[in-house]
Amino acid sequence: MNISKKLSFIFIFIFPFVFSFSTGVCAQAELVQLSNGESMSSQDLFSLAVALEKKYPTLIYVDIIGYSVDQKPLYSIIMTADVDTLRRQKDFNILRQHYFVEAGTHARETVNPLIVMKQIEDYAIDYHQENHIQEFSLSQMLEEVAIHFLPLTNPDGFDLVKFGEASVQTQHGRKLLLSVGDDHYTNFKSGISGVDHNRNYPQHYFDMDENIWKNIWQLNISNLHATSPSAEFYPGPHPASEPEVKTVMNYILRYDFRNYISFHSRGNVLYWNKYFAPDYYNQRSKTLAQTIQIANGYELMDEDNGLGSGYLSDFTSSETLKPLITVETLPISTDLPTQAHLYPTAYEANRLVPLYAISEGQKTGYFPYRLYVDDVYVRDFENLTYANAIAQKYNGKIVEGDATPSMFLNKKKRTHSIYEFLIKHLPLI
């Protein structure tokens, strides 16, 4: 992570635990305290991420990947063995299998960002201290995979529901917030611009029967819908109107993620099904959901009525055909934002969810149809028809193979990064 950027955010936010850092990482007190969750701001969480990186520098890398409407940092936490060396490699996308864990999309669902932070710390402890987690060996797993955690993708809304209008730090942000008709801030799902981020993603899918791409964003709206900026359900003026959404889209396309976990609240349920997706995709998604159910015991929600659109899961399923499971923590009757006594309960139910998802991804392995753009590997597909449709969208080509893909078809010909190519073509509308 860029040191000058990091210092600009943390120099006045020094936690009491920072003074105790040393090289004996396993002997120190744990940094992530669930009992502090109710009072923590987005800046507190960011400082905590930096503290974890400092404590486990060979295992954790904090990457600022964008900024919110209110200019608060959006960041990923990459966890893998020898992380600083691996992430610099041009073929990092295939050197390890990559997995995605996201939380904090909806403002009032405040328990999940700290759940993710605690997962990161527990996994780091187990890497250095075997048997901290009985069910998995992180020392082995993190030699094979890279986990990308995005703990808080809506920092503006997160702060708003906890601390009110005073948490907004820019004039532009205050102006946007005051233009939203609803001032019941503790009930916000949206960002401070009044856009519900989980309605703001583009929603295209390839109809294999008609052999065309279809745009169904806001075509089949439900009764949970707003037509102007609001505390919840307003999808925005157009897909990917929000910088936070664009940042997450960019990150999803940057790596070859094998599967995805998105933490929300409430219901103690797992959403996995996509009505527009091919049957083979939904079967793999259901298998992944059943695997995660072993960890938390949540109910599987099998039905997708096709009402509503713009979800993160819509975007990832259409673009990658890799499963995304939405994990709804906390009982349906729980008040939001989350009260302090519920943090440990929610964490214990979900502490191992990403590890079960990884175990399922490792069993699945790679698919035979590999997309290359400018001779650079992007991702693989199970179905040739869908693979060719994606290749046409990106002006790429499909190469059939088995085992781990090659990152480059022609190293000498390569002139720029696929990441640069994908960023140039965002948003995919």
Image: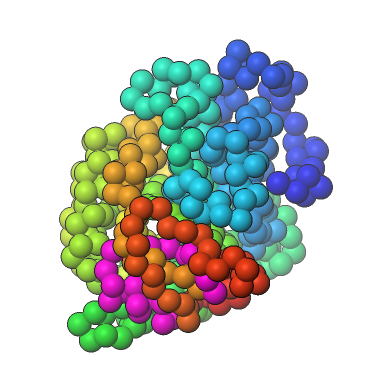
Look at the image and tell me whether residue 237 can be seen: yes
Which residue is rendered at x = 23% and y = 86% of the image?
210
- Residue furthest out toward the top: 27
State the residue in front, 391 or 189.
Answer: 391
Which residue is rendered at x = 51% and y = 67% of the image?
409
Which residue is rendered at x = 74% and y = 64% of the image?
171
Q: Quadrant of residue 332?
A: top left
State the residue in front, 93 or 254.
Answer: 93
Q: Position of residue 263 (x, y in %)?
A: 40, 47
Q: Is 399 placed above or below 190 here?
A: below
Which residue is rendered at x = 61% and y = 47% of the image?
87
State the residue in front, 49 or 165.
Answer: 49
**Residue numbers of the magenta segment:** 374-393
Q: For residue 406: magenta?
A: no
Q: Position of residue 178 (x, y in %)?
A: 63, 66
| Left or right, residue 169 beside residue 420 | right
Q: Position of residue 371 (x, y in %)?
A: 42, 69
Look at the image and tell me whether residue 329 can be seen: no
Q: Quadrant of residue 419?
A: bottom right
